[in-house]
Image (cartoon, helix red, strand yellow):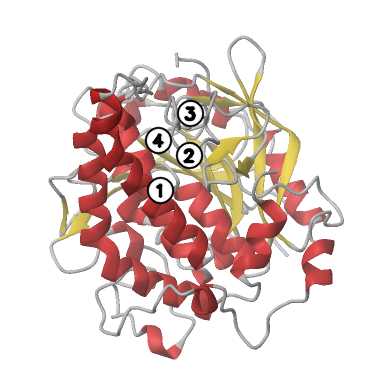
Amino acid sequence: MHPAGTPRTTVVVVTWQGRDHLGACLDALGRQTRPHRALVVDNASTDGTRELLAQHPSTPVVLRTATNLGYAGGLAVALRQVHTPFVAWLNDDAAPEPDWLAELERALDETPTAAAATATLIAPDGSVQSSGVRLTAQGYGFDRNTEPPDGAEAPESVASGHDARRRADTPRSAVEPLAAGSAPSVPVATASVVEASAGTRSSAAGSAAPTGSRPAAELAGTVPVHAAASATAGSGGFDSPGHGGQARRTSTAAASHGTASQVTTQQAAAAENPPGGGPAVFGLCGGAALLRTPVLRAIGGVPARFFCYYEDTDTAWRLRLAGHDVVWAQRARVLHRHGVSTKPGSPRFHRWNERNRLLMLLRCAPGEVAVRELLRFAAITVLLPLRRRRGQVVPSTPNFRVGLRTGVLAEILGRLPATLLDRRRIGRRSRVPRQLVWRRWSGR
């Protein structure tokens, strides 16, 4: 039990070049009706964000990185600084309503089987951007309440880059910029600055990695839950490759492997409507969500190598494989300026999306699904020049550029041994078979 007035949640806001919109986010956090600890990860901003944070009346704890670690990297680095039962993820161009955190905490309090609650993200025009995440039959993640782009389910046309959806949790850590406002009204843990970047660097591909063999942020805040995981002290996490061991084969049998304590089909079916806080959804939108801190650590933390995009859907996969629910806290509302900080539709956007979807499937999905989608992506890449020579229509979006796609495939190939090691580790802590999660949630 926590005494009244004691924060139960650390709200993590990752920002990069956020001077023009971060103030409104912090103002809205200051108006929350629940006490909380605010932790801002400043991903090496150079636009005046540092000065804004120093002067803002909410005086959040600031964690500065030497390089831009991306949204996923920022979340992961922050996790080691979280000492509360809950951790919230909030985009820096999002402004939560005063009861946002209270509603998220209530949802988890009322649903003991849930390890995460996702908020309702509202666009400036009042429409709903997201009420959680759903899986398509091809393993793409879409915000609930949005429709996939035309043809997104068809093998040769993920036309606008599935990301009608990628989307509301658009990382505040790799691109540009809401407004400014008032002052805090409830207790907020304040005010230190932590320089947290020693030993990290950005790779040429744009993702964060440490100077050693393990990606910096993925290690943050994770704890080994199997003896075989052997994480070194102080670097810890166990979704990160870099320790020995053979990658597991991705055959159907191995891919669907769980543990001796797997739940039954009936138990998994019952989890679709968990008692308490809200309706079950497949996954959380990383733009505004609340997670149980010990559970997040136990499933391996945040996949920092993703840099940004799909870190939330990958987390949802691992929560469900571990037997936990995700619920929608409908009354936890956030105004979100989608696309203010990122450039939806840019080549880098599409590259991260396509790469991270495939990495997520290789880590979490049934083996036949992961292999099918990887082969489909490669086959389309090979066929694109032929289609163009024949005068057939090819979508104009960057994810149908052969150069971008071959770059994605090269990154996947380079990361394959580490990703398969991740897969084995995820499987060892799973209680629900991959196939069961896929059958219950894909295409819905």
Cα–Cα span, label 1 and label 2: 7 Å
Residue kind at label 2, given as amino acid type: Pro
Q: Are marks 4 and 1 in contact (CB under 8 Å)?
A: no
Cα–Cα span, label 3 and label 4: 17 Å
Q: Residues within 10 Å of mark 3 (few under 14, many from 20)?
A: many
Q: Residues within 10 Å of mark 2 (few under 14, many from 20)?
A: few
Cα–Cα span, label 3 and label 1: 43 Å
Q: Are marks 1 and 2 in contact (CB under 8 Å)?
A: yes
Q: Can residue 90 be seen in this view?
A: yes
Residue receiving disc 4: 171
Residue receiving disc 1: 376
Q: How crowded is mark 4: few (under 14 residues within 10 Å), some or many (20 or more)?
A: many
Residue receiving disc 2: 155
Query: Of 58 and 126, which appears nearest the observer?
Result: 126
Q: Taking 225 as reference, is 287 above or below it? A: above
Residue kind at label 4, given as amino acid type: Pro
